[in-house]
Amino acid sequence: MIKYSVKCSNDHQFDGWFKDSATFDKQAKAKQVECPRCGDTKVSKAPMAPRISKSSRSDKVIEARANEVAREMAEAAGKIREHVEENCDYVGTQFAEEARKIHYGEADERGIYGEATIDEAKDLDDEGIDVLPLPKARTTS
């Protein structure tokens, strides 16, 4: 069902419910839509402004949930970083070089973390060496 604001040739406006736009057009052409005020059957759709609702309670609930999920994700990222820092070796700016040594069996296999440029990370990926960026440490504000 669709609701239209309808106007007769005498500028009386009224609302009408129709199955669809084609149904309104068919009924109006057949003079089956009548103005309740004057009985005029020469009608057309009146200009209508779209209904734009203001922020509703559900919008606020959705926003609150989104904020909660963002906090949970930040907490999980912090736990990942803590785990890596507690269980892996920090190799600093030698990360790409050390990752290659481990990959090619030139160094003992172990978890490492450190710094790498974007180009170094891309080169490692091109060589089939799996690397992932480490979530940044949370800052307190």
Image: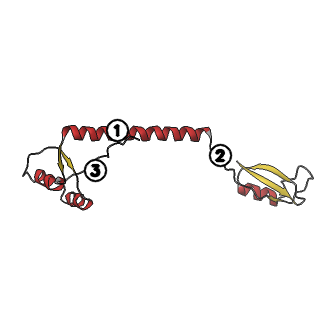
In the displayed orientation, state which residue is furthest to the right. 38
Q: Residues within 10 Å of mark 2 (few under 14, many from 20)?
A: few
Residue 21 in the image: x percent, y percent?
Answer: 71, 56
Mark 2, secondary structure of its residue: loop
Q: Earlier in the sequence, mark 2 or mark 1?
A: 2
Instruction: Find disc 1 in the rendering and name its residue.
Output: 76
In the displayed orientation, state which residue is furthest to the front. 141
Q: Residues within 10 Å of mark 3 (few under 14, many from 20)?
A: few
Residue 113 in the image: x percent, y percent?
Answer: 20, 47
Q: Check if mark 2's residue and mark 1's residue have beta carbons within 8 Å.
A: no
Question: Which amino acid is tagged 1?
Answer: Ala
- Taking the spot 72% from the left edge, 57% from the top edge, the residue there is 22
- Taking the spot 88% from the left edge, 58% from the top edge, the residue there is 11
Residue 46 in the image: x percent, y percent?
Answer: 79, 58
Instruction: Find disc 3 in the rendering and name its residue.
Output: 133
Question: Which amino acid is tagged 3?
Answer: Pro
Question: Which amino acid is tagged 2?
Answer: Lys
Residue 77 in the image: x percent, y percent?
Answer: 33, 41
Q: Quadrant of residue 10?
A: bottom right
Q: Earlier in the sequence, mark 2 or mark 3?
A: 2
Colouring: secondary structure
The residues bearing labels 2 and 1 have C-alpha atoms spaced at a distance of: 34 Å
